């Protein structure tokens, strides 16, 4: 139930985001969701794409530094308290959330959170034992396409 995410390191200056997005588009690779974090000198673009292997290879060939990491997608009720309840599953555990980002589908009452855990297998086990829906990449892609 882990999903491959690409992390791309970019200089923090104007127009640096355009070229990698253009390269993916020209190759027919769809960006499903993303987040961008920055520091004074560089940024990290983290994204889930429709074909992570092809995307990583393409971007590396173009000279970008690309890191492939495993993340976990979790369905959460899109309502006040939904996130707090989900985070409560990790109270009193040694599972660390390194970062996360979220997206909604603009429909229904659910959202998906993308988590990077220090121990994804233990996190998945904990989530599933709490009855929380952990979804795979196929399900993430299917939901976004609707």
Image (tube, grey):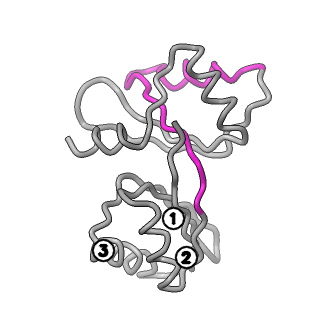
Task: Determine whether the residue tagged by mark 1 lies in a helix, strand or loop.
Answer: strand
Q: Which callout, 2 or 3, points to the residue nearer the camera?
A: 3
Which residue is labeled 3 in the image?
27
User: Relative to residue 107, is residue 40 drawn left or right?
Assistant: right
Return the x and y of residue 91 as percentages of the image width and height: 72, 21
Task: Report which quarter residue 75 is drawn in.
Answer: top left
* Residue 27 or residue 19, whichever sits in front: 27
Please report contact status of discs 3 and 1: CB closer than 8 Å, yes or no. no
Real-space Cα distance between discs 2 and 1?
7 Å
Residue under the point 23% across and 31% down: 107
Residue 89, quarter of picture: top right
Name the disc covering residue 10, or none: 2
Residue named by callout 1? 45
Q: Which numbered disc flags the more N-terminal residue, 2 or 1?
A: 2
Q: Secondary structure at mark 2?
A: strand
Q: Is residue 48 above or below residue 55?
A: above
> Which of the two labelled residues, at mark 2 and mark 3, occupies the earlier sequence position?
2
Element type where label 3 sits in the image? loop
Q: Which residues are magenta?
A: 68-92
Where does residue 115 sit, x and y in percent of width and height? 57, 41
C-alpha separation, residue under disc 2 versus residue under disc 3: 20 Å
Give the Cα separation between the discs numbered 3 and 1.
18 Å
Dividing the image into 4 quarters, which one contains the C terminus? top left
8 and 84: which is toward the camera: 8
**Label placed on residue 109:** none
**Comparing marks 3 and 1, which lies closer to the viewer?**
3
- Asked if marks 2 and 1 touch (Cβ < 8 Å), the reply is yes
**137 to 38, vertically: above or below:** above
Outermost residue toward the left in this view: 146
Residue 8 covered by magenta stretch: no
Tell me, yes or no, whether the two marked residues, 2 and 3, touch with CB atoms within 8 Å.
Answer: no
């Amino acid at each position: 139930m882990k999903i491959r995410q690409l992390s791309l390191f970019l200089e923090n200056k104007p127009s640096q985001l355009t070229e990698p997005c253009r390269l993916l588009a020209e190759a027919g690779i769809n960006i499903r969701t993303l987040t961008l974090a920055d520091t004074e000198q560089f940024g990290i673009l983290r994204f889930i794409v429709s074909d992570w292997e092809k995307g990583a290879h393409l971007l590396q060939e173009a000279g970008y530094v690309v890191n492939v990491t495993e993340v976990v997608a979790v369905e959460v009720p899109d309502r006040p308290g939904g996130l707090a309840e989900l985070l409560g599953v990790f109270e009193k555990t040694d599972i660390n959330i390194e970062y996360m980002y979220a997206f909604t589908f603009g429909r229904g009452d659910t959202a998906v959170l993308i988590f990077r855990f220090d121990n994804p297998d233990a996190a998945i086990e904990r989530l599933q034992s709490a009855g929380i829906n952990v979804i795979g990449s196929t399900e993430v892609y299917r939901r976004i396409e609707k």
